Amino acid sequence: MSDTRIPLAGVIGSPVAHSRSPALHGYWLKRYGLQGYYIPMDIAQADLAEALQTLPKLGFVGVNVTIPHKESVLQLADTVTDRAALIGAANTLIFRQDGKIHADNTDGSGFVANLRQNAPMWAPASGPAAVLGAGGAARAVIAALIEIGAPEIRVANRTRARAEALRADFGAKVVVHDWVQAAGMLEDCATVVNTTSLGMTGKPQMKLSLDALSPKAVVNDLVYTPLRTHFLDLAEVQGATVVDGLGMLLHQAAPGFERWFGLRPDVDEDTRQAVLKA
């Protein structure tokens, strides 16, 4: 018998029962015949620090992080990547052999990889981007758009002060628009992204006129329940290329899986179908 410890990983948050990550990582482990387990763990905020000290001792090599812990883990990590620090949140923790906790954020790279895979003609540097919302997902998307050369990023949020905070953190490329005037900011945009929960199952619909939307635009909704939102349907009617949010979930998971289990998984249609059926 081998005395090598079987690597454990998982997702921590509260709640986590809804997470698709266990189905995704479980599929990859089985597909590639790798030893390991990926476990959902509902951990209360008050128990977070103790959990992060204990999990490595139990054989965990890392975890994904979801609400409400994505900001808190930055204060508990020993090292934080520049992009996680800029975004102000981490979604991936690596427990190193020296006992250190390394925090990263792969949401932005997942966002970009999703659009590149599903809208190959996407040219983010060819025109402004419009981002609806100003939460953690918006921060990841904005950081990624700046990195890949979007010339201007127009942001609208129901609470304008949160959008103004993004301009303060990310600089002059961010231009803030009032939420009630968000329809006007779509004109000549190459990229449009909904980072809000509007349109999600159980939430109100996104009520935004897309009359100003260019048919050359690529429109992405980070919501993936339902897979096709009303927002994407309206964008498609305008002639735009539409991309759902499931691909971002799949792509953001791949770097963590590689670090924990030693193999870079393919994000393909088989992966997508496995998660949809879970």
Image: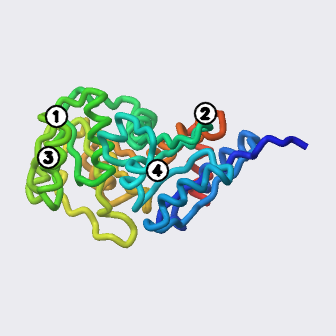
Pointer 4 residue? 246
Pointer 1 residue? 152
Of callouts 2 and 1, the N-terminal one? 1
Amino acid of disc 3: Ala
Q: Quick check: 120 left or right of 193?
A: right
Secondary structure state at the residue bearing disc 2: loop
The picture places residue 251, in percent across and down from the top left corner, at 49, 41
At x 18%, y 39%, the residue is: 153
Which residue occupies the foreground of this view, 166 or 116?
166
Secondary structure state at the residue bearing disc 3: loop
Residue 59 position (above or below residue 12)? above
Amino acid of disc 1: Glu
At x 53%, y 37%, the residue is: 255
Query: In whole angstroms, how far apart are the C-alphas of marks 3 and 1?
Result: 17 Å
Q: Are marks 4 and 1 in contact (CB under 8 Å)?
A: no
Local crowd size for mark 3, using a 10 Å CA cut-off: few (<14), some (14–19), many (≥20):
some
In the rendered picture of this protein, how many numbered marks are placed on residues?
Answer: 4
Of callouts 3 and 2, the N-terminal one? 3
Q: Are marks 4 and 2 in contact (CB under 8 Å)?
A: no
Front label number (4 vs 2):
2
The picture places residue 202, in percent across and down from the top left corner, at 37, 72
Q: Quick check: 66 left or right of 240?
A: right
Which residue occupies the foreground of this view, 105 or 176?
105
Local crowd size for mark 2, using a 10 Å CA cut-off: few (<14), some (14–19), many (≥20):
some
Of callouts 3 and 4, the N-terminal one? 3
Pointer 2 residue? 264
The picture places residue 254, in percent across and down from the top left corner, at 54, 39
Pointer 3 residue? 212
